[in-house]
Image: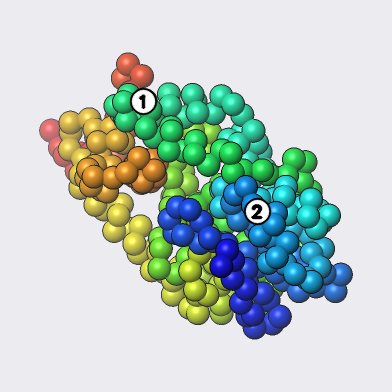
Amino acid sequence: MLYTRVELPLGIRRITNLLPTRPGHVHSYLLPGKDGATLVDTGIGLPDAKEVWAAALGEDEVARIFITHFHPDHVGAAADVAELTGAPVYQGTLDYAQCELVWGNPNWPNRIADWFLTHGVPSEITEELIDSGDVYRPFIRFQPDPILVDDGDALDGWELVAAPGHADGQLCLLKGRVLVSADHLLGRISPTVGLWPASRPDPLGDFLESLERTIELAPEIALPGHGDPIVDPVGRARELIEHHRERLAFTESSLTDRPRTGYEVSLDLFGADLKPASRRFAVAETLSHLERLVLEDRVERREDVGVVAYTARQLGRSF
Ligand SMILES: [Zn+2]
């Protein structure tokens, strides 16, 4: 079976597509509306994406397509599904700008290679990291010139809620007590929160604020991009805040007065034996923690001959 369909409460349907890489699947949601459904996310654009979607949608009318964020497993088949259904695509303003920057730009791999070198990744490993990121390129067919939307906009009775962190332009949908959380809130997996070139400067700070906002909004159920529905979204948001507080403390403890690069610290935080695809995220995630610590005055960043390195701040030392 290439996809599964599950009926959820309130007439919401979940369509799950398989992914060739971890976590092995991605959910899209059909939110019912008067003029047809709003389809949230489109899965990755494997060569047979259009046929799979034709079968998965069956008789369902799609009135509009909404992209929660530009990662390959969410935006990949957007143009295919738009062509199949004739429905307009909606995407966040910032998210679409980043989507074009990363997937519409042949120079992006060079830019990211330079950036990994700046953060201490050895050059032979940098090449592996670039290759592992590039495997997705052929499977991304985003929709050019979508209808741009932002935090607070309404989409067929759902309110768009910005939740930067996992992606700068991540948008969720909220109606009553239901939050379609995409990858902002996941059940068992901790969403990756990485610093990337041209990303906002403090993605982990953004993420922690987004989690606080989730707690304030107090949804009763969250429908994530991966894994089961989350029955205690507020509790899960608290757990993730706690998790990152612990990771921040661990990151801080791995620094001394000897400068260490983001790559070196990532070996402590995530271990030395990682496949290139995981190492990419490990370095980016380590950097988001280091940069948060810099902003909290717990760590110092230095840049020397084109390499960025971090040291512990010697708080309370008196001479
Ligand atoms: Zn995802």
The quadrant in which the N terminus is found is bottom right
Q: Pick whichever, 299 or 251, lies toward us.
A: 251
Residue 58 seen in render? yes
Give the residue displayed 54% in from the left and 28% down from the top. 108
Residue furthest to the top in view is: 305
Q: Amino acid at mark 1?
A: Leu
Residue furthest to the left in view is: 319
- Camera-nearest label, 2 or 1: 2
| Crowding near the residue tagged with mark 1, few <14, some 14–19, many ≥20 C-alpha atoms within 10 Å | some
Give the residue displayed 69% in from the left and 60% down from the top. 53
> In the picture provided, is 131 more to the left or to the right than 83?
left
Q: Pick whichever, 207 or 284, lies toward us.
A: 284
Residue contact between numbered discs 2 and 1, judged by CB atoms under 8 Å: no
**Which label belongs to residue 117?**
1
Query: Where residue 123 sits in the image (x, y, percent)?
Result: 32, 24
The residues tagged by marks 2 and 1 sit, at their Cα atoms, a distance apart of 35 Å
Q: Amino acid at mark 2?
A: Ala
Question: In the structure shown, which secondary structural element does the residue marked by tag 1 occupy?
Answer: helix
Q: Pick whichever, 39 or 218, lies toward us.
A: 39
Query: Where residue 6 sits in the image (x, y, percent)?
Result: 61, 77
Q: Is residue 127 above or below residue 150?
A: above
Q: Is mark 2 within 8 Å of ligand 1?
A: no
Query: Where residue 191 sits in the image (x, y, percent)?
Result: 44, 57
Residue 296 seen in render? no
Question: In the structure shown, which secondary structural element does the residue marked by tag 2 occupy?
Answer: helix
- For disc 2, the marked residue is 49
Query: Where residue 237 sits in the image (x, y, percent)?
Result: 45, 68
Q: Pick whichever, 260 or 298, lies toward us.
A: 260
